[in-house]
Image (cartoon, coloured by chain):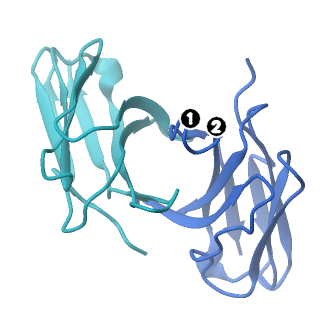
Chain colours: A blue, B cyan
């Protein structure tokens, strides 16, 4: 079946502009995660959605970052007034409902470059 | 942010050799996941571990969930050139659905 998809695959933006990144999870996966991966580094947790519960936003680095998810479908990560330190690959992952499986499956990522 | 200690950071090995890498923490985890990431791609799940002491294999890969729940290792036997990539561990924090990722082991296989 279809895996996690993300768009765009690459995004180059000027400092100060807003960007919106999209994630389509695997159908039937109720949990959705966003991570940031800086060049040569590990994955940094940003935000977690589970069904209609309040999201866990504890990893968002500043109030310039926000994310939304409608039901159990598409999610968008928005970065306002982008800064050069926001340059990274943004990865989305989805998993089945907690209690059934905790295995996360990742999309290919969006490579964001802020100039 | 928080990260697990993963070692080694990088390794060069000859084709056919066995490889071992591990992740350690001062915290306990409920689940361990091991991933491989190729350049320009998202991480791909290799093995999932759910119980302390659990030993699980997937082809040439074997991983174990440490008895103390604070560590895990991954072994790759008889390495081949396509094993090249970055390997990450991830531990699930108890009482949450949040995962903390290791810093990665970059593996290079010399033919």
Q: Is residue A46 above or below residue B14?
A: below
Which chain is disc 1 placed on? A
Task: Quote the CA–CA distance across marks 1 and 2.
Answer: 7 Å
Task: Please give left or right for residue A35 compared with residue A53 in the image.
Answer: left
Q: Please, what secondary structure does the residue beneath circle 1 have?
A: loop
Residue at 25 percent of width and 23 percent of height:
B56
Which chain is disc 2 placed on? A
| Residue A40 in view in this figure | no
Residue at 59 percent of width and 79 percent of height:
A85
Quadrant occupied by the C terminus of chain B: top left
Is there CB contact under 8 Å for labels 1 and 2? yes
Dot 1 and dot 2 within a common chain: yes
Task: Please give left or right for residue B68 compared with residue B47 in the image.
Answer: left
Q: Is residue B2 above or below residue A22?
A: below
Residue at 28 percent of width and 44 percent of height:
B106
Task: Please give left or right for residue B95 compared with residue A97 in the image.
Answer: left
Q: Position of residue B61 (x, y in %)?
A: 25, 21
Q: Which residue is mark 1?
A: A100
Quadrant occupied by the N terminus of chain B: bottom left
Residue A96 location, quadrant: top right
């Amino acid at each position: 079946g279809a895996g996690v998809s993300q768009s765009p695959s690459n995004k180059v933006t000027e400092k100060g502009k807003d960007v919106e990144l999209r994630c389509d999870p695997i159908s039937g996966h109720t949990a959705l995660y966003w991570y940031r991966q800086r060049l040569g580094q590990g994955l940094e947790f940003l935000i977690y959605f589970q069904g209609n519960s309040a999201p866990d936003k504890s990893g968002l680095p500043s109030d310039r970052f926000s994310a939304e998810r409608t039901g159990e479908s598409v999610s968008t990560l928005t970065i306002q007034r982008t800064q050069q330190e926001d340059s990274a690959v943004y990865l989305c992952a989805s998993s089945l409902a907690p209690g059934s499986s905790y295995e996360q499956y990742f999309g290919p990522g969006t490579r964001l470059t802020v100039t | 942010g928080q990260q697990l200690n993963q070692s080694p950071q990088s390794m060069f090995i000859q084709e056919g050799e066995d490889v071992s890498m591990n992740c350690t923490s001062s915290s306990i985890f409920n689940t361990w996941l091991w991933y491989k990431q190729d350049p320009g791609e998202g991480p791909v799940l290799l093995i999932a571990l759910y119980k302390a002491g659990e030993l699980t294999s997937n082809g040439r890969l074997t991983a174990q969930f440490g008895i103390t729940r604070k560590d895990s290792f991954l072994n790759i036997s008889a390495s081949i050139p396509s094993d090249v990539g970055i390997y990450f561990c991830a531990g699930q924090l108890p009482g949450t659905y949040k995962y903390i990722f290791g810093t990665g082991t970059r593996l290079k296989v010399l033919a």
